[in-house]
Image (spheres, helix red, strand yellow):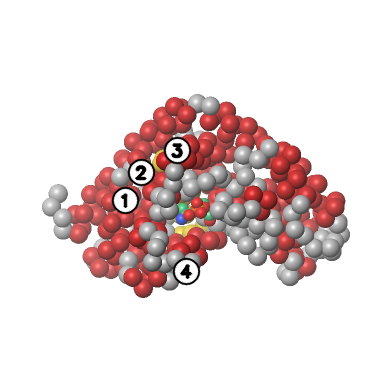
Amino acid sequence: MTTSTFTPRVFSGIQPSGGLTLGNYLGAIKRFVKMQDEGMPTVYCMVDLHAVTVWQDPTDLLRNTRELAAGFIASGISPEKSILINQSQVPEHAQLGWIFSCVARMGWMQRMTQFKDKAGKNTQNVSLGLFGYPALMAADILIYHATHVPVGDDQKQHLELTRDIAAKFNHDYGVNFFPLTEPVIEGAATRVMSLRDGSKKMSKSDPSDASRINMTDDADTIAKKIRKAKTDPDALPSEVDGLAERPEARNLVNIFAALNDQTVEQVLSEVGGQQFGTFKPLLAELAVSKLSPISTEMARLMSEPDEIDRILGRGAAQAREITVPILEKTYEIMGMVR
Ligand code: TYM
């Protein structure tokens, strides 16, 4: 069975557990906009129920959810073209999440590297929700029968699990009801790395603010962080192979390519031979020119939180036209009295 028997639909989500980073923008949001503009039906989600697998201050969660919505819209997600929601306003996500907790196997969940990374040595003290998180993520996707999920590289394993859950449900009930969703992990920036350490992912939870570019950083801050980004003493190569053993250089070139809608080959054909003293100001200028209009628009949207809430309310109503019938059918397949 393939996704071809299902109508194409795109779904993806981001946690409102902190500010947006350049990693989220290039690895996810920029690509969400592209898929929206290519004309497939798209649903994009602020996954607040995922965020609370780790305690969130309620005031921060409220603000971060609205700011994330503002970031989506300011980046080009149109509430007229895409359904934009926060997860907790569409209760069928959590309801199907429970069903999938009953489909997924303990052994599958125990292999999830993101859980191991997040829990660290603390496995007995983290929430049960953090462990079960991938089952809810599968439900986020499959409650829409979504066929395509654009994400960064770090979500690959969760999407494989989503396919395993869909396949097991279909097998256990002898149906072809849930699609085997395709991960869409494409482009130069599927894994944007820390500006301080090219072996670590750029992350909102890194204690060092200098390690990341936040979507709310002003032009001076962006330029300063790029100027101070860790690099090596060599000039940039003209060929991609020359970046193989140079993670920090590779990261900056990848960021340049993704921001400028170029391939890494194209970028290197233009900047190969340059020292970082020349390349970094070019990158800073490019980053500021692309990101500043977004942060200015985010700030404007944040001054009207009621409007954001209205958009999310409307998105939830549109989403439920899809999710309610899919949940009903799921329960019916499973033999629950309707
Ligand atoms: P989250 O909130 O950690 O990240 C949101 C999206 O941003 C991408 N991303 C990156 N891409 C490139 N480089 C980086 N440094 C970087 N950091 C983050 C992530 O890959 C992701 O695409 N479990 C998900 C949220 C989620 C979800 C879903 C996603 C919940 N349900 C259903 C897709 C479909 C997460 O924690 O993403």
User: Type of residue at label 1?
Assistant: Ala
State which tag comes first along the sequence, 4 or 3.
3
Task: Compare marks 4 and 2 and give the one earlier in the sequence.
Answer: 2
Which amino acid type is marked by label 3? Thr
CB of mark 4 within 8 Å of CB of mark 2?
A: no
Which corner quadrant holds the N terminus?
A: bottom left
Choose top left, top right, bottom left or bottom right for residue 128.
bottom left
- Circles 4 and 3: CB atoms closer than 8 Å: no
**Whole-percent x and y of residue 132?**
36, 61
Is residue 220 positioned above or below 330 on the image?
above
Comes first in the chain, label 1 or label 4: 1
Residue that numbered label 3 is attached to = 59
Badge 3 element: helix
Total numbered circles: 4
Question: Which dot, 4 or 2, sits closer to the camera?
Answer: 4
Cβ atoms at labels 1 and 2 below 8 Å apart = yes
Reading the image, the residue beneath label 1 is 94
Q: Which circle's residue, 3 or 1, is located before the other in the chain? A: 3
Alpha carbons under labels 1 and 2: distance apart: 8 Å
> Would you call the spot at circle 1 few (<14 residues within 10 Å), some (14-19), or many (20 or more)?
some
